[in-house]
Image (cartoon, rainbow, N blue to C red):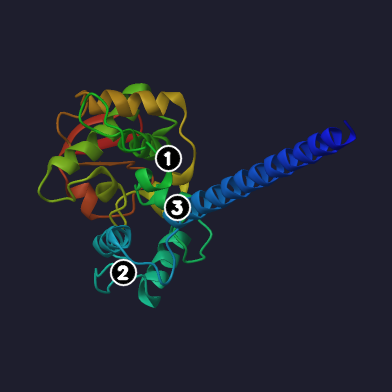
Amino acid sequence: MSKMIRAGALALTLVVAFAAIVLFSVQQTSKLEDAAAYGQDIEAAVLKEGSRGSDVKTVQDKLRRWGYYTGSVDGIYGPKTKEAVKYFQRKNGLTADGIVGKKTFEALGMMEQANAGGSQSSGNGYTNSDTYLLARCIYGEARGESYTGQVAVGAVVLNRVRSSDFPNTISGVIYQKHAFTAVSDGQINLTPDQTAINAAKDAMNGWDPTGGCLYYYNPVTATSEWIFSRETVITIGKHVFAI
């Protein structure tokens, strides 16, 4: 009887030990998987010197078209790309560290890289990131204007996208060098309110209070002689809209 009890106790001890080993192994595997996933997220969310790939090419292409970068669009994040990113960051009120993280991706209009799911398309053919970027531009440029005036600013951006004289994307138009004061002074990075978001959506859905204008300006604050030479179509609030 005593032998049977000892044998049973030994068997129980072995079972408990085996279960502990299995549990430890599962926990370690889970930790390794979590660490790997975290590492992948960080790698996907950040571009820096030494990075390579299609996202680097996209950043280089945007910065080159907007006048911040003069090097090759080769997908290699070298010193020239880093300096161009720092230049872009300084001009847009971001930390000038030469690293493309979430905020810099957003400023570049690369919302898919900045935020998973950001590139989902809305019913009008534009992406959610397009809508948000346009709303930021409207908020930065015209948040003191009437609702119609805010839609009008959004419409000008979209008219430029459709014009062969301008870049063919919303981000390209907005970040074209010296095109918008809100980009130059950093107000593009402010969080838009719901009014600006609604104005962006209405402009994207086809409302154009300007009748096709490609330019607008405030005659009180404008300093360019050239802009005054454009043909005026309509004045909405403080902005003159022209072609």
Q: Position of residue 26 (x, y in %)?
A: 60, 44
Residue drawn at x 31%, y 69% is: 69
Which label is found at residue 131?
Answer: none
| Residue 217 in view, yes or no | yes
Q: Position of residue 209 (x, y in %)?
A: 22, 25
Q: Is residue 65 left or right of residue 142?
A: left
Discs 2, 1 touching: Cβ within 8 Å: no
SS under mark 2: loop
Q: Which residue is mark 2?
A: 69
Quarter that holds the N terminus: top right
Q: Which residue is mark 3?
A: 45
Which label is found at residue 140?
Answer: 1
Quarter that holds the C terminus: top left
| Residue 243 in view, yes or no | no
**Nearest to N terminus: mark 2 or mark 1:** 2
Residue drawn at x 32%, y 62% is: 56
Discs 3, 1 touching: Cβ within 8 Å: no
Distance from disc 3 to disc 2, alpha carbons, whole Å, reads 22 Å
Q: Position of residue 196 (x, y in %)?
A: 40, 28
Amino acid beneath label 2: Tyr
Amino acid beneath label 1: Gly
